[in-house]
């Protein structure tokens, strides 16, 4: 079968931007279209979906631009959707069926195309059985849930590591895949999912791109479907890492052609089916709404019983992870704190999640122009009690600079800060390449018998370690020399800026996974000993043991929530004084 793009039936179509929608607890984005052939995008799960986020969003926009009403959504318990009552495969299949009904009711779609990615393709094939699906696109599907779990278990060995390079501590009964912790019910039901034993009901037209697992294409043909197969060039670059994800243009062009092929639905006298007024995701404790400002998108989580005089909380993107966070940590934190009366905003910077593209096309990592976007978020969030902000890695870097500049920020909880100031001549890819993080971590590692075995097997790059240690030593010598020449920190130095933050009554809390390289930055700029660091900060640096860069291990997020709660409580006690100071300004 030859696929060719044919948009003749859609000439003159009115393209409208996607709008946020909530469908029975599912959060999604709906792009109206004039065609009566609607498309539901069924993404994959966890780490892979975070990596695919921007490309998946672009595919949805291209489908809408071609005139097809399109809905992409987060599964229950993922992204910005509500938590599910159950968490098995059936819950995810039911979510796809709800999305299909939305397109039929709101967009008036008479034909439905499901486009599934990886495990989402497997779910889509099963959802098609009860919804009368006309076309199905399966992008690199899994034939069974066990195959998915095996692949994720293998990949997590390269994704999930502690800062000193040790393997991520895993509980076989509750594994973590790139920060994603599948519920026990989902793990159990995935173990039973097998399309080779129970083939799904036939769909008239199927496009399967990528490896053909267990001869799935033949089984689908035997069931009565017309199946077109092809390669999926660029699958690994698309899904392996959000920071370097490359949209598979060739594959998506085939998807667009397949969706549009033989378009026979009348569109001439049809207006786009507009979404209903946004229905927020809500519980008895809180409700959420989407806000857009400039080129940014955010979700405000508002408690129904706000805690008096409590500052609002702003979450800044970590790297290029969407606003829901790595492993959905940010959504979970925002909602847990809303239960304690804290209002929050989790935002997407330009170039991240659903934010607009940046003019330079690059992600907003260690670029100070993104500070203006965070300032705009403060404008939307501060109602007089001030704001506490938090961010990880590059989000911590931006948070530090906002804390230095904006007096509305009463505290910053900065997690695994890589550096206080970025050298624009530095190569970002080299700087962020995985490596052992600090001198202390090397000493700890060499006390482990297994580490010496890894050295002897050639698995540890000793030369790179020695080079790294030499660089650290040189940096500290340079810092010591500067202190001799200028014993008191200047106002523009890190120590001087930290002192100015404290002078205005604000607070800087530094939180590190043990062994992170950013600890060396603290030593260089705030003093070698923990006592000197504590005097300059006003409290000790917080070190978390046996957790990774993203705080994905069991209990790490609980500890972070305790830190956030403590800082918010302390800030709320000082709110009247803060208001008097702001009024005087």
Image: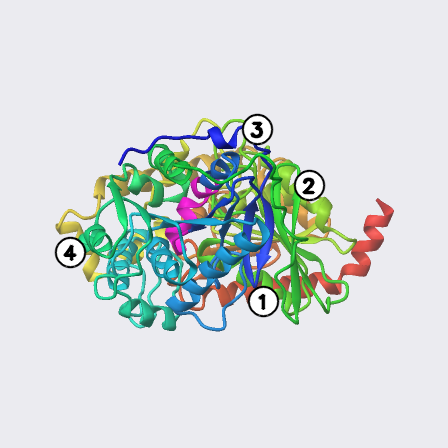
The rendered magenta stretch, by its main secondary structure, is classed as helix
Query: Could you say which disc has been placed on residue 376 in the image?
Result: 2
**Where residue 163 sits in the image (x, y, percent)?**
35, 53
State the residue at coordinates (46%, 30%): 7
Q: Is residue 465 left or right of residue 289?
A: left
Lower sequence index among marks 2 and 1: 1
Question: Which numbered disc, 2 or 4, marks the residue closer to the eye?
Answer: 2
Q: CA distance from mark 1 to mark 3?
A: 47 Å
Are the residues tagged 3 and 2 within 8 Å (C-beta)?
no
Report crowding for label 3: few under 14, some 14 to 19, many 20 or more residues within 10 A (C-alpha): few
Question: Which numbered disc, 1 or 3, marks the residue closer to the eye?
Answer: 3
Q: State yes or no: residue 51 in magenta.
A: yes
Query: Closest to the observer: 459 or 206?
Result: 206
Q: Which residues are magenta?
A: 43-57
State the residue at coordinates (30%, 41%): 235
Lower sequence index among marks 2 and 4: 2
Lower sequence index among marks 3 and 4: 3
Label 4 belongs to which residue?
A: 453
Q: Quadrant of the N terminus?
A: top left
Label 1 belongs to which residue?
A: 336
Label 3 belongs to which residue?
A: 12
Q: CA distance from mark 3 to mark 4?
A: 67 Å
Secondary structure type for disc 2: helix
**Where residue 528 sits in the image (x, y, percent)?**
47, 49
Q: CA distance from mark 4 to mark 1?
A: 43 Å
Are the residues tagged 1 and 3 within 8 Å (C-beta)?
no
Quick one: which residue is furthest to the right in this view?
584
Secondary structure type for disc 4: helix
Camera sees residue 277: yes
């Amino acid at each position: 079968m030859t696929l060719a793009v044919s948009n003749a039936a859609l000439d003159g179509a009115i393209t409208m931007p996607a709008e946020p929608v909530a469908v029975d607890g599912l959060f999604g984005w709906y792009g109206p279209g004039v065609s009566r052939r609607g498309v539901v995008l069924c993404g994959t799960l966890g780490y892979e979906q975070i990596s695919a986020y921007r490309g998946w969003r672009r595919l949805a926009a291209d489908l809408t631009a071609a005139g097809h009403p399109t809905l992409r959504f987060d599964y229950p318990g993922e992204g910005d959707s509500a938590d599910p009552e159950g968490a098995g495969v059936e819950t995810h299949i039911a979510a796809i069926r709800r999305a299909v009904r939305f397109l039929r009711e709101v967009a008036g779609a008479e034909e439905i195309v499901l486009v599934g990615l990886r495990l989402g393709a497997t779910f889509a094939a099963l959802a098609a059985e009860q919804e009368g699906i006309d076309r199905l696109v399966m992008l690199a599907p899994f034939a069974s849930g066990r195959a998915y779990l095996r692949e994720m278990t293998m990949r997590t060995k390269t994704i999930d590591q502690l800062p000193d390079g040790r393997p991520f501590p895993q509980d076989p009964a509750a594994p973590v895949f790139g920060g994603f912790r599948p519920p026990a019910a989902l793990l159990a039901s995935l173990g039973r999912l097998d399309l080779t034993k129970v083939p799904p009901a036939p769909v008239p037209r199927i496009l399967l791109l990528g490896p053909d697992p267990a001869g799935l294409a033949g089984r689908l043909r035997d069931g009565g479907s017309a199946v077109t197969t092809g390669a999926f060039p660029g699958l690994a670059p698309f899904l392996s890492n959000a920071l370097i994800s490359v949209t598979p243009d060739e594959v998506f062009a085939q998807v667009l052609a397949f969706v549009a092929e033989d378009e026979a639905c009348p569109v001439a006298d049809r207006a786009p089916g507009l979404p209903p007024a946004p229905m927020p995701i809500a519980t008895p404790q809180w409700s959420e709404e989407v806000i857009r400002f400039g080129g940014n998108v955010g979700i405000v989580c508002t408690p129904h019983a706000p805690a008096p005089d409590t500052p609002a909380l702003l979450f800044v993107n970590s790297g290029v992870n969407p606003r829901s966070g790595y492993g959905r940590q940010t959504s979970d934190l925002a909602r847990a704190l809303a239960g304690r009366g804290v209002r929050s905003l989790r935002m997407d910077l330009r170039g991240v999640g659903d934010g607009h593209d940046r003019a330079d096309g690059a992600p907003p990592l260690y670029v100070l122009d993104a500070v203006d976007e965070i300032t705009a978020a403060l404008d939307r969030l501060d109602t007089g009690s001030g704001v506490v902000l938090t961010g990880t890695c590059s989000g911590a870097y931006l948070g530090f600079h906002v804390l230095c500049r904006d007096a509305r920020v009463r505290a910053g909880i900065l997690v695994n800060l890589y550096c206080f100031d970025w050298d624009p001549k530095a190569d970002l890819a080299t700087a962020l390449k995985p490596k052992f993080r600090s001198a202390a971590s090397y000493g700890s590692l060499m006390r482990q018998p297994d580490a010496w075995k890894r050295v002897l097997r050639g698995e540890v790059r000793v030369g790179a370690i020695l080079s790294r240690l030499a660089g650290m030593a040189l940096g500290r010598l340079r810092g010591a020399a500067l202190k001799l020449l200028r014993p008191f920190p200047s106002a523009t130095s890190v120590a001087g800026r930290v002192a100015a933050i404290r002078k205005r009554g604000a607070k800087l809390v530094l939180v590190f996974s043990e062994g992170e390289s950013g600890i060396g930055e603290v030593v260089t700029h705030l003093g070698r000993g923990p006592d000197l660091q504590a005097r300059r900060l006003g409290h000790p640096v917080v070190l978390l043991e046996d957790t990774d860069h993203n705080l994905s291990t069991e209990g790490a997020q609980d500890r972070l929530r305790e830190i956030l709660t403590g800082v918010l409580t302390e800030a709320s006690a000082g709110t009247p004084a803060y208001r008097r100071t702001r009024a005087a300004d």
